[in-house]
Image (cartoon, rainbow, N blue to C red):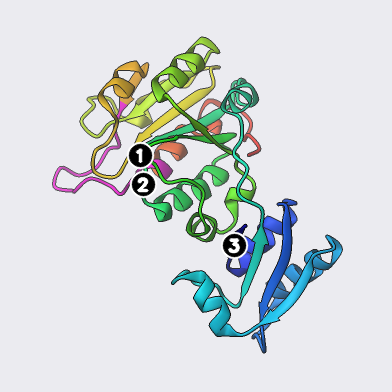
């Protein structure tokens, strides 16, 4: 069993039909439209709605801001990476690959941006990466209910498969001479590959990408946080840059 905390994440999870068993609501909660919506959605889905003490939610949340509400869900069901590549194989297709993002808050923020910019899915390595956790649910504001996430054993092999399916693999690299904004948009789907905190792209992963590109900044600036860099790159590579339709995540 997993727990999703926070009013927006809980409502998003319920609206997306995330398999769940119960809704926990803090006793004497300061209710708003999101709490009312969560209770109505839970009732409609036939879930148990239970009032609990704030201390109970505090103990379960382990420091995650729960806002007086939590949803008991089944363990997160990861998508199939090959299915994601098929879903994104059109001119407006955008798939995001994360090479070693270990901070769940960064992952949640990245997934939130992925939803905003029409990404069909996010692909993570099974090792040296955070997975989808309650912190990811909370930080993504529920976007993880709408953007499928897949795990793979080998990112290099995944990139090669995507290239064979027609994707342009763009690796985000601060030291690259080319800027993301200058990557020519075409009628090919894009696989954006972003490295982890501190270490960036793995050597072999970077060499496998078709293009390495960075983000234009003033010379005195430090490197960007992984989630901020991913959001900027996703904006620069959004399908509307080439006149394509916004893809539905």
Instruction: Give the main secondary structure of the magenta stretch.
Output: loop
> Relative to 19, does residue 77 appear above or below in the rendering?
above
Q: Earlier in the sequence, mark 1 or mark 3?
A: 3
Find the distance from the CA under tag 1 to the CA under tag 3.
Answer: 23 Å
Residue reaching furthest to the bottom: 28
- Point out residue 50 in the picture as x, y percentages from the top left corner: 73, 77
Q: Tell me the residue at 51%/48% (across/down).
A: 132
Front residue (pair 179, 28) = 28
Q: Which of marks 3 and 2 is nearer the N terminus?
A: 3
Is residue 171 rendered to the left or right of residue 167?
A: left
- In the rendered structure, find residue 128 and report the number of the disc placed on it: 1
Q: Are marks 2 and 1 in contact (CB under 8 Å)?
A: yes
- In the rendered structure, find residue 3 and report the number of the disc placed on it: 3
Is residue 79 rendered to the left or right of residue 43?
A: left
Where residue 87 sits, quadrant-wise, is: top right
> Relative to 112, does residue 149 appear above or below in the rendering?
above
SS category of the residue bearing label 2: loop
SS category of the residue bearing label 3: strand
Residue reaching furthest to the front: 1
- Point out residue 211 in the picture as x, y percentages from the top left corner: 34, 19
Front residue (pair 128, 120) = 128
Residue of label 2 = 102
- Point out residue 14 in the picture as x, y percentages from the top left corner: 72, 58
- Point out residue 169 in the picture as x, y percentages from the top left corner: 42, 21
Task: Judge depth for marks 3 and 2 and give the one in front.
Answer: 3
Task: Judge depth for marks 2 and 1 and give the one in front.
Answer: 1
**What crowding class fits label 1: few (fewer than 14 Cα within 10 Å), some (14-19), or many (20 or more)?**
few
Is residue 109 rendered to the left or right of residue 214?
A: right
Where residue 193 sits, quadrant-wise, is: top left
Q: In which quarter of the image is the C terminus?
A: top right
Which range is magenta? 213-231
**What crowding class fits label 2: few (fewer than 14 Cα within 10 Å), some (14-19), or many (20 or more)?**
some
């Amino acid at each position: 069993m997993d727990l999703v905390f926070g009013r927006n994440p809980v409502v998003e999870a319920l609206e997306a039909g995330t398999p769940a068993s119960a809704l926990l609501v803090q006793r004497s909660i300061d209710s708003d439209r999101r709490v009312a919506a969560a209770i109505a959605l839970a009732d409609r889905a036939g879930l148990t709605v239970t009032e609990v003490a704030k201390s109970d939610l505090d103990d379960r949340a382990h420091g995650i801001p729960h806002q007086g509400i939590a949803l008991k869900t089944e363990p997160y069901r990861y998508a199939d990476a090959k299915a994601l590549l098929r879903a994104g194989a059109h001119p407006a297709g955008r798939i995001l690959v994360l090479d070693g993002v270990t901070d769940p808050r960064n992952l949640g923020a990245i997934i939130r941006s992925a939803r905003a910019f029409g990404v069909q899915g996010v692909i993570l390595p099974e090792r040296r990466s955070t997975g989808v956790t309650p912190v990811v649910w909370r930080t993504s504001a529920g976007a993880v209910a709408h953007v499928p996430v897949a795990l793979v054993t080998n990112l290099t092999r995944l990139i090669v498969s995507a290239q064979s399916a027609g994707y342009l693999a763009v690796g985000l690299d601060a030291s690259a001479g080319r800027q993301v904004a200058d990557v020519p948009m075409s009628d090919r789907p894009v696989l954006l590959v972003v490295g982890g905190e501190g270490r960036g792209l793995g050597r072999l992963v970077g060499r496998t990408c078709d293009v390495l590109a960075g983000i234009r900044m003033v010379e005195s600036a430090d490197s960007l946080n992984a989630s901020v860099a991913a959001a900027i790159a996703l904006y620069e590579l959004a399908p509307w840059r080439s006149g394509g339709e916004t893809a539905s995540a």
